[in-house]
Image: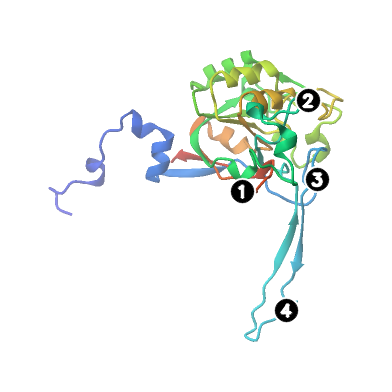
Amino acid sequence: MTGTEPTQEQNTPDLDADDRDPLITAVRGNLRLIELGQPFFTGMPCSPNHPGFRMTLARRHGDTVRPDGGSAANEIIVTGGHVGTHIDALSHVSQNGALYGGVDAHEAQRGGGFSTYGAEHLPGLLRRGVLLDIARLHEVDTLPGGYEITPHDLEAAVRQAGVRVGIGDVVLIRTGWSRLFDDPNAYLGAETGVPGLGVQAAHWLAVRDVIATGSDTTAYECIPPGDGHRVLPVHRVLLVEFGIYIIEHLALEDLAASGLCEFAFLLAPLRIVGGTGSPVRPLAAVSR
């Protein structure tokens, strides 16, 4: 290189606001990916309302050996659609017999699958993501069981993070509860309850027209001690009244440790025809 040739740094234009946008950064490839999903394994925590995850090898190396010495192994997986990190389709919850938009739930589910709002219609997401760290807000590693997150909590977390919540965003709520994921009894919180959003906080998100929201717990919303998953009013508000997708069982500790509250959120649901949800592997794309 001669002294007159421009360097790479000299060729790089000054960054404007668009260049700092996490979605623009993601498209240009100057990024790292942070896992937001839990691993799937036999015996993992699962809501009592859903069948659990099971995997075993159906064929092992050596069961069949090809003439050239090659062999293959494979597995069989049995799981509910709402096990591990997953997204709820709008067919998942009804109120008084109706799905989102007044769709008749009984008619939609005829034939063993949903003809309306099936999981095959869940959108792939490449959206602006926002982390609202409620555990950090209260200066604890994990919110107490049964703690109800309020609009005041969300507004304070927004101020603390220095972000905004706007139309089409994906808002992730950290309670710190995923720290208990390796202890199914503690994580499910049958006796202690589980922290999460209350109905007023759900309305706070809905009026801001977010497309999806998720948390690091099994049911997203507040579960009082001893109540279990008997009544889930936040699901009614988000899925039935406003058509906002819910993502559950997120792993948010690495994202929180990064100190980043704004990122590009990536998610691709499985196209399960007629299903009510899909396992997912969400990712946060952040600039290096």
Q: Is residue 283 left or right of residue 182?
A: left
Tell me which numbered mark, 1 or 3, is placed earlier along the sequence. Answer: 3
The answer to whether any part of residue 218 appears in the image is: no
Report the Cα–Cα distance between label 3 and label 4: 32 Å
Direction top: furthest residue: 152
Q: Position of residue 15 (x, y in %)?
A: 30, 33
Residue position marked by numbered label 1 in the rendering: 270
Specify the quadrant that holds the N terminus: bottom left
**In the rendering, which numbered label is found on residue 223?**
2
Mark 3 or 2: in front is 3
First in sequence: mark 1 vs mark 4: 4
Amino acid of disc 1? Leu
Look at discs 3 and 4 and give the one toward the viewer. Answer: 3
Provide the residue designation for mark 4. 64
Q: Residue at image x 62%, y 20%?
A: 137
Contact flag, marks 3 and 2 (Cβ < 8 Å): no
Label 4: which secondary element: loop
Q: Amino acid at mark 4?
A: Thr
Q: Could you tell me if residue 90 is visible in this image?
A: yes
